[in-house]
Image: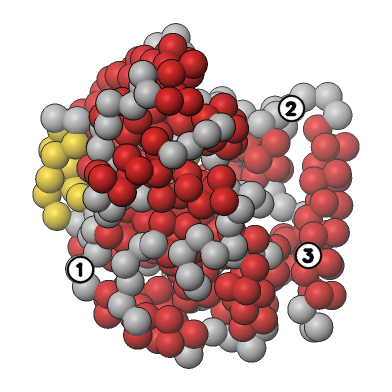
């Protein structure tokens, strides 16, 4: 659990440079001592945190110092591009937020857009793709209300819309402008969470403002759990940017007893434990000592070895598939159909969305078969390794 213990020296220095709660003198000493700045640049590009590192280097006045000088122009370009992307994204998100408010749809910004606007030093320091919001209502009603504001679904694939209305958890919309940023509207949350989770987040949110629009701000405990879930189960190898999100979301929490009780109540203490452990290992996230035992006591028998292996080798190496199987086999709090048939043969709209293909395209069923085979292989491996 020691911060940086499982990291090679280069990445250990990088982690210190990115930490939120560290003196400027200590950060300057680490960055000024870098001898191979290009290797650091390559590493931060892989971890998707280049704009943030460039901002810190510029703020410390190191762009013309030592090994950073040859990279000055490249770092300045990276910051300029990040600013331009963020300005356009903020305009698109602001338009959708305004339309949601006018349409009377409660919206709670979460994950990337809330992190960028509230917890990163500058909005452009956090790269992101789609923006995410928890909204109240059913997808067809939401789409009907937004249509009058020039906002529509990103995909007109009937299978994707049918999946969202029947067993999905989000619909992606965008302002019909060239190159407009997409916004994922979550009317339900992750399938392994209780069906009421989205409504609970909206009910606990407080009035606030984001991008000049009145919105509902997520409660810090709720937001941390959502960010942790996205990190651990969102992709097989999440970049450091997502681990840094957990670090920043955790630093905003003041009531850790609520985090523990709510993550246990929502059935994801293993996910939150691994996310917090990784943030602590990478960025020395300050956490109460008792939180580890409180979450560990709530683990299921098959979650324990997965968590133990993650803590021993670095939480960023956690076996995501094994955790997914544990959620599916041992938790049972989620709202999605838990049948083996649906696990291995998912809705065509789900497949089309995940593969970013049209369900009406020639050969789609071949792609669906391949997708199902991949899910079966991953599930079988996870089950075999978990000794079930």
Of the pair 339 and 74, the residue shown nearer to us: 74
Using the numbered discs, state the Cα–Cα distance from disc 1 to disc 3 in whole angstroms: 37 Å
Residue found 52% across the figure and 68% down from its top = 274
Compared with 373, 193 (above or below) is: below
Q: Position of residue 372 (x, y in %)?
A: 81, 51
Residue that numbered label 1 is attached to:
254
Determine the image quadrant of residue 225. bottom left
Return the disc, 2 or 3, that comes first in the chain's sequence.
2
Using the numbered discs, state the Cα–Cα distance from disc 1 to disc 2 in whole angstroms: 49 Å
Residue found 52% across the figure and 34% down from its top = 35
Display coloring: secondary structure
Which mark is on residue 360? 2
Q: Position of residue 30 (x, y in %)?
A: 40, 44
Compared with 304, 341 (above or below) is: above
Of the pair 194 and 48, the residue shown nearer to us: 48
Would residue 348 appear left or right of 133 to someone viewing this image?
Answer: right
Q: Residues within 10 Å of mark 2 (few under 14, many from 20)?
A: few
SS class of the residue under badge 2? loop
Residue that numbered label 3 is attached to:
379
Would residue 248 appear left or right of 4 to someone viewing this image?
Answer: left
Q: Position of residue 151 (x, y in %)?
A: 36, 22
């Amino acid at each position: 659990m020691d911060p940086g213990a499982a990291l090679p020296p280069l990445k250990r220095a990088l982690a210190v440079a990115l930490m939120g709660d560290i003196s400027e003198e200590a950060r300057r000493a680490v960055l000024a001592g870098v001898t191979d700045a290009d290797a650091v640049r390559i590493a931060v590009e892989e971890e998707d945190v280049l704009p943030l590192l460039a901002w810190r280097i510029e703020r410390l006045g190191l762009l013309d110092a030592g090994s950073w000088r040859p990279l000055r122009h490249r770092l300045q370009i990276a910051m300029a591009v990040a600013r331009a992307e963020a300005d356009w994204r903020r305009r698109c998100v602001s338009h959708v937020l305004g339309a949601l408010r006018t349409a009377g749809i409660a919206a709670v910004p979460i994950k990337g857009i809330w992190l960028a606007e509230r917890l990163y030093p500058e909005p452009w320091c956090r790269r992101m793709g789609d923006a995410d919001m928890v909204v109240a209502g059913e997808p067809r009603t939401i789409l009907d209300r937004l249509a009058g504001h020039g906002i529509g679904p990103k995909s007109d694939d009937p299978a994707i819309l049918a999946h969202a209305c029947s067993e999905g958890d989000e619909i992606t919309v965008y302002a019909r402008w060239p190159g407009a940023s997409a916004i994922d509207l979550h009317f339900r949350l992750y399938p392994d969470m209780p069906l009421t989770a989205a409504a609970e987040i909206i009910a606990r949110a407080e009035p606030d403002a984001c991008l000049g629009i009145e919105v509902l701000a997520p409660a810090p405990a709720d937001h941390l759990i959502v960010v942790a879930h996205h990190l651990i189960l969102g992709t097989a190898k999440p970049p450091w940017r997502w681990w840094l999100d957990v670090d920043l979301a955790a630093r905003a929490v003041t009531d850790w007893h609520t985090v523990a009780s709510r993550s246990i109540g929502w059935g994801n203490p293993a996910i939150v434990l691994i996310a917090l452990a990784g943030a602590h290992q990478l960025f020395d996230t300050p956490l109460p000592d008792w939180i580890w035992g409180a979450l560990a006591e709530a683990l299921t028998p098959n979650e324990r070895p997965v968590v133990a292996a993650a803590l021993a080798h670095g939480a960023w190496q956690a076996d995501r598939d094994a955790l997914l199987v544990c959620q599916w086999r041992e938790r049972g709090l989620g709202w999605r159909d838990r049948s083996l048939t649906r696990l291995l043969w998912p809705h065509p709209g789900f497949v089309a969305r995940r593969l970013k293909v049209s369900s009406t395209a020639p050969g789609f069923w071949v792609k669906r078969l391949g997708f199902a085979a991949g899910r079966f292989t991953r599930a079988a491996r996870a089950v075999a390794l978990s000794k079930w």
